[in-house]
């Protein structure tokens, strides 16, 4: 009886100690974007014209407990501008998160903003990046002063009558060898399988390793970045036994001063969306149902080797630790000249791990 009493007392004290470490928290993320695509000058041969104008509001609440553990839940509401009376889209989220030092683990349906890698339009188009607010799966991330590595699993689709089984692994990393030299990568490994109505499996994998030189530490600039890399794709339509392995090269120059910048991205090689206009077993074009990346990565309408150049004149400003604004005027070129242009405006607010005040 004495032993039982001591055990119960120890459990009570343990739960009491843990309760002292439990802290209610809340997050709010706000994202508003206007993305205006103008490609009529090239007759929309690679990308269509159109405008995305919308906002996203993401409130989350949960508890932090122990040493770096959190459980949170909430939702993201997305509302297109100019659609009075139309109901906004709602997407629920709930996840477990563990952060210890440089390491972060997240599991469940969690905000994509927990990732920290730099993903270009080779991985996500501007519209895809905005529209997909959550990752359904798992994140492992290591963030340090001189390194940042991550891998995330996003389960995009559950097998259904017309919904394909689909998942995607994304990964990015940067390790600084010196204050001005880093070894980096970004990659996407996408499994696009069948549904009950349409059979077939397509592998859509792309890896972009590159070397980055950053000279702003020795020059009076906010950024002077030069990077050189390779772009390797592995694309397999298993039903047709059609394998494509495009290999190209790219170079990037990014200069910024007083929050104004110019960034030029140049690629030479074959298409990194080789099945874009191919058809599945039901006769449907794959298009952006298969590819999350920008359709401009088709490179040429005839599928031949060519060049793609993206010139971005931008202004970006962090108003404080939580609020960021950005405006971009982007011009796209291929071997024939100007493909079209984009105007992008984005305002983001990110309030993470805010504690509820307690009356004392």
Image: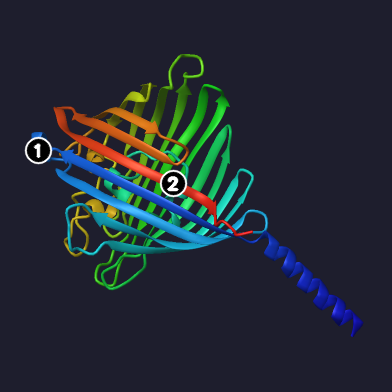
Pick whichever, 279 or 121, lies toward us.
121
Cα distance in 3D space between marks 1 and 2: 36 Å
Residue 78 in the image: x percent, y percent? 30, 57
Left or right: 340 as drawn, with respect to 235? left
User: Which residue does the image show at 38% across and 21% down from the upper left?
Assistant: 258
Look at the image and tell me in which quarter the C terminus lies: bottom right
Left or right: 133 as drawn, with respect to 295? right
User: Which residue does the image show at 37% across and 25% down from the upper left?
Assistant: 259
Q: Residue furthest right?
A: 2
Q: Which mark is residue 346?
A: none
Look at the image and tell me in which quarter the N terminus lies: bottom right
Quarter of the view holding residue 348: top left
Pick whichever, 168 or 131, lies toward us.
131
Residue 4 in the image: x percent, y percent? 85, 81
Q: Residues within 10 Å of mark 1 (few under 14, many from 20)?
A: some
* Mark 1 residue element: helix
Instruction: Tell which circle, 1 or 2, labels the residue nearer the N-terminal end.
Output: 1
Q: Residue furthest bottom?
A: 1
Residue 95 appears in the figure: no
Residue 302 in the image: x percent, y percent? 15, 39
Q: Height in image: 308 above or below 129?
A: above
User: Which residue does the image show at 40% across and 45% down from the upper left?
Assistant: 349
Residue 217 in the image: x percent, y percent? 51, 18
Residue 91 appears in the figure: yes
Labels 1 and 2 touching (C-beta < 8 A)? no
Q: Which residue was labeled with disc 2?
A: 350
User: How many numbered marks are there?
Assistant: 2
Q: Residues within 10 Å of mark 2 (few under 14, many from 20)?
A: some
Q: Which residue was labeled with disc 1?
A: 40
Q: Height in image: 53 above or below 303?
A: below
């Amino acid at each position: 009886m004495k032993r039982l009493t001591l055990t119960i007392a120890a459990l009570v004290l343990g739960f009491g100690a843990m309760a002292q470490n439990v802290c209610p928290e809340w997050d709010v993320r706000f994202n508003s974007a206007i993305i205006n695509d103008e490609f009529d000058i090239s007759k929309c041969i690679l990308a269509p014209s159109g405008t995305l104008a919308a906002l996203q509001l993401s409130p989350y609440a949960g508890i932090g407990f122990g040493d770096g553990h959190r459980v949170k839940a909430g939702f993201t509401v997305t509302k297109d501008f100019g659609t009075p009376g139309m109901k906004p889209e709602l997407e629920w989220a709930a996840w477990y998160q563990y952060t210890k030092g440089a390491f972060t683990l997240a599991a469940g349906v969690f905000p994509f903003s927990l990732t920290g890698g730099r993903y270009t339009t080779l991985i996500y188009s501007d519209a895809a990046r905005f529209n997909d607010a959550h990752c359904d799966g798992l994140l492992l991330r290591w963030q340090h002063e001189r390194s940042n590595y991550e891998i995330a699993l996003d389960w995009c689709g559950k097998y259904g009558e017309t919904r394909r089984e689909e998942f995607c692994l994304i990964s990015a990393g940067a390790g600084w060898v010196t204050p001005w030299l880093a070894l980096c990568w970004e990659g996407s490994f996408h499994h696009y399988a069948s549904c009950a109505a349409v059979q077939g499996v397509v592998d859509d994998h792309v890896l972009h390793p590159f070397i980055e030189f950053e000279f702003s530490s020795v020059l009076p600039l906010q950024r002077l970045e030069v990077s050189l890399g390779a772009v390797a794709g592995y694309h397999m339509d298993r039903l047709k036994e059609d394998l494509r392995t495009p290999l190209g090269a790219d170079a990037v120059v990014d200069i910024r001063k007083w929050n104004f910048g110019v960034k030029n991205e140049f690629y030479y090689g074959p298409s990194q969306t080789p099945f874009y206009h191919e058809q599945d077993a039901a006769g449907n074009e794959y298009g952006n149902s298969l590819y999350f990346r920008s359709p401009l990565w088709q490179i040429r309408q005839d599928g031949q080797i060519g060049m793609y150049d993206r010139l971005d004149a931008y202004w970006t400003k962090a108003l404080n630790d939580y609020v960021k604004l950005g405006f971009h005027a982007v011009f796209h070129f291929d071997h024939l000249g100007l493909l079209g242009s984009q105007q992008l405006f984005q305002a983001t607010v990110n309030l993470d791990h805010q504690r509820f005040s307690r009356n004392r």
